[in-house]
Image (spheres, grey):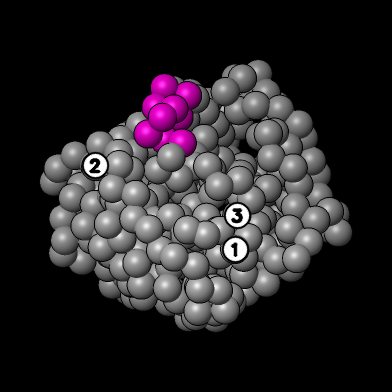
Amino acid sequence: MYSDKKILVTGGTGMIGSHLVELLVEKGANVRIIEHEREIPDELKKLELDIMRGDLTDRKFSDNVVKNMDYIFHLAAYTGGLGRTSTHPASTLTPNLIMDGNILESAKNEKIEKFLYASCTCIYPNDEKTLEEGDAWKGNPPEAHASYSWSKRMGERQAIAFHKEYGMDIAIVRPSNSYGPRDSDDLETAHALGSLIMKAIKKMDPFIIWGDGSPIREYIYAKDAAKGMLLAMENYCVGDPINLASGEFVSIDELARKILSITNTDPEIKFDMDKPSGQKRRVLSNKKAEEKIGFKAETSLDIGIEKTINWYKHRLGM
């Protein structure tokens, strides 16, 4: 399906996106990525890629970057951990809404064959049960990252609208909390697991955990999420959101202690109660993904954490 196809991966320099690019190149695709604020990972510099520089909030650039493409995987977003999204709500929400609208309009006009929209687990409301896709609109997302959550909710609605009105083949995926090599090495913008790893390998003491450490989160390895996106594009372009979940979940406190154990560090652990903890439990059901696209995560949390630690050590020259 991908051999000799021209494929745009927005967000292709990011954690999941860069793994997706590698998988597509392995399958014989001709891949285009966008260079924007984030540098191109070393792993991608070895590949033969079509690289364009620009900003998807610019409609002219959006129209230009989709030209002659067959498929689009749209992963690009202004994001970050709780720290950034809670303190930069406007500069998270507004550009994401503009960017999603631009790329969908450009794709429609270019008559793109298939389009995938990458949503996220944060669109779900506070609910401690295992969340199925239909639970997303049964309440508002947590206020701590509302700007990012609402941008993704509206991105999904735009994608569904384009599927319904224009007949576009669109897949929509909601990966659970992702982690892995090529996450940000900036503590403010890294995902939760990545920031904990950086604190551990930098031997920060005391070791600060936001909130009380009790919230339970499910984690999916970036390459597994990328494989799920390929399966969704191949089998489920029907404008219907689908979770990509691993089935492995732990509390933030347990996760931190696991990382400290693997890195053989023993700092004093302190909980910063002035910072938000986030919702108590966010775990996704993978039942629909298994049934509709045959997706099942392959990488265990322990193995994934070890791989991620090794990448960060290499990245930081340690």
Q: CA distance from mark 1 to mark 3?
A: 19 Å
Position in image of residue 61 (x %, y %) = 67, 23
Q: CA distance from mark 2 to mark 1?
A: 34 Å
| Magenta-colored span | 84-93
| Residue 287 shows in the view | yes
Q: Which residue is mark 1?
A: 203
Amino acid type of the residue that numbered disc 2 sits on in the rendered structure: Pro
Provide the secondary structure element on which disc 2 rests.
loop
User: Residue 306, image x and y in percent?
Assistant: 59, 77
Q: Closer to the camera: disc 1 or disc 3?
A: 1
User: On residue 141, which mark appears?
Assistant: 2
Examine the image and state in which quarter residue 150 appears: top left
Give the residue at x 44% y 27%. 88
**Which residue corresponds to mark 3?**
183
Residue, x 18% and y 50% (percent of image)?
126
Question: Label 1: few (<14), some or many (≥20) within 10 Å?
Answer: some
Q: Is residue 232 left or right of residue 15?
A: left
Q: Earlier in the sequence, mark 2 or mark 1?
A: 2
Query: Could you tell me if residue 4 is visible in this image?
Result: no
Q: Amino acid at mark 3?
A: Asp
In the image, 312 versus 50, the foreground residue is 312
Mark 2: few, some, or many residues within 10 Å (few <14, many ≥20)? many
SS label for mark 1: loop
Q: Nearer the viewer, mark 2 or mark 1?
A: 1
Q: Nearer the viewer, mark 3 or mark 2?
A: 3
Q: Is residue 216 above or below residue 8?
A: below
Q: Nearer the viewer, residue 172 or 280?
A: 280
Q: What label sits on residue 170 in the rendered view?
A: none
Q: Residue 285: x percent and y percent?
A: 27, 68
Whether 156 is among the magenta residues is: no
